[in-house]
Image (cartoon, grey):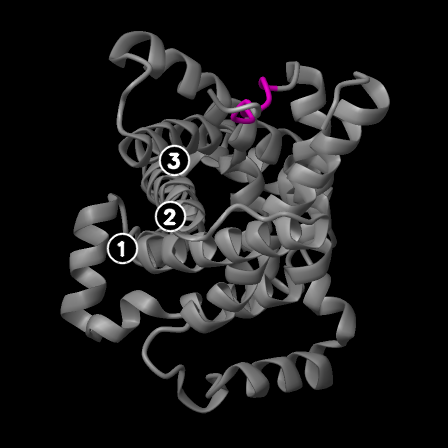
């Protein structure tokens, strides 16, 4: 009989500490990577090549935004995401933990880990989507170049949208957001499990950080490949103000319309800035979440880690 016991995975943190770890991870990621989200949105709102005013590359987009609109434009619309990052990321990780417990209860402890990770990820993504829709809509309206003089800031945008379009307008694009988050979270958590299975367990703290970053970055990249077509349609749905002709209504018909009118590549508009954000961003999320969780276990809950 071996003298060493196999190390068991730690129990899930209490919800309030999951919330804190998720909040720190989310805000860290968004402060680091947000300008790429602005660039992504500009590309997704650009129909075709955008004509003379269209952006030809990520570098061209950055250069022209800074030159014509000022450096601060790269952080325009950041308040809604920061406000939602704490509950959003907490929901992402906490819901994933809770769904894992729930599904194991129904499916048994010996359920396939890869399939379980995908199932819990999709479920967490659907839960997360209901929370983020209003914040996403305000963010997209602010990021659109055409709305530069329309809204003075996040609260002004929120007030005008509710006043002129009604409070339910804040949930325009809910169905597309459900698709986007279900696909991303399912791909992210499923891929993380697969990469962790493929990489040997690390022996050092730096090795653990590297393993987590690689798993998160690969997961973020794969998830972005899965969900970008839904994100393109969601962005266009949410940028249709009341009174305009609603070209995009539902996600799957919207995906088909973009493909038919603009070609397959249009479904991946903004993919490069998005994957440059969410690839490394996925690694940052996982590393920060696990690091903060370990610190809470060690210094607050006094557990052995």
CB under 8 Å between discs 1 and 2:
no
Residue 27: image quadrant is top right
| Residue at the (58%, 40%) spot, across then down | 135
State the quadrant of the C terminus: top right
Vertical order, 55 against 73 (above or below): below
Q: Please state which of the two labelled residues, at mark 2 or mark 3, is closer to the viewer.
A: 2
The chief SS type of the magenta part is loop
Q: What is the distance, in whole Å, between disc 2 and disc 3 at their CAs?
A: 25 Å
Q: Which residue is mark 3?
A: 174
- State yes or no: discs 2 and 3 in contact (Cβ < 8 Å): no
Quarter of the figure with residue 302: top right
Q: Which residues are magenta?
A: 5-12
Q: Nearer the viewer, mark 1 or mark 2?
A: 2
Camera-nearest residue between 176 and 7 = 7
Residue 253 magenta: no
- Residue 94 image position (x, y, % from top left): 55, 24
Residue 248 in view, yes or no? yes
Q: Residue 191 in the image: state x and y as whole percent.
A: 38, 48
Residue 191's disc is 2
Residue 159 can be seen in this image: no
């Amino acid at each position: 009989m071996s003298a060493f016991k196999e190390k068991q995975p730690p129990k899930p943190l209490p919800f309030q500490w999951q919330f804190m770890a998720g909040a720190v991870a989310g805000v860290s990621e968004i402060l680091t990577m947000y300008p790429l989200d602005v660039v992504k949105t500009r590309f997704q709102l650009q129909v075709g090549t955008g004509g003379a005013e269209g952006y030809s590359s990520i570098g061209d987009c950055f250069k022209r935004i800074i030159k014509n609109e000022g450096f601060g434009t790269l952080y325009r619309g950041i308040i809604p995401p920061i406000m939602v990052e704490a509950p959003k990321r907490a929901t992402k990780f906490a819901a994933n933990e809770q769904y894992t417990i729930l599904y194991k209860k129904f499916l048994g402890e010996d359920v396939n880990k890869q399939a379980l990770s995908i199932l819990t990820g999709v479920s967490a993504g659907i839960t997360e989507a209901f929370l983020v829709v209003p914040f996403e809509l305000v963010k997209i309206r602010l990021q659109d170049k055409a709305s530069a003089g329309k809204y003075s800031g996040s609260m002004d945008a929120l007030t005008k949208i509710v006043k002129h379009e009604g409070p339910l307008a804040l949930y325009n694009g809910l169905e597309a957001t459900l698709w986007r988050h279900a696909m991303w979270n399912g791909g992210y958590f499923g891929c993380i499990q697969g990469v962790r299975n493929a990489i040997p367990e690390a022996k050092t703290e730096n090795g653990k950080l590297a393993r987590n970053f690689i798993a998160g970055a690969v997961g973020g990249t794969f998830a972005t490949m899965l969900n970008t077509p839904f994100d393109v349609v969601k962005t266009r749905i949410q940028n249709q103000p009341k009174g305009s002709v609603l070209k995009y209504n539902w996600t799957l018909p919207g995906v088909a319309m973009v493909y038919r009118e603009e070609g397959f590549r249009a479904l991946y508009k903004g993919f490069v800035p998005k994957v440059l954000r969410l690839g490394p961003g996925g690694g940052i999320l996982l590393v920060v979440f696990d690091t903060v969780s370990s610190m809470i276990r060690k210094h607050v809950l006094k557990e052995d880690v």
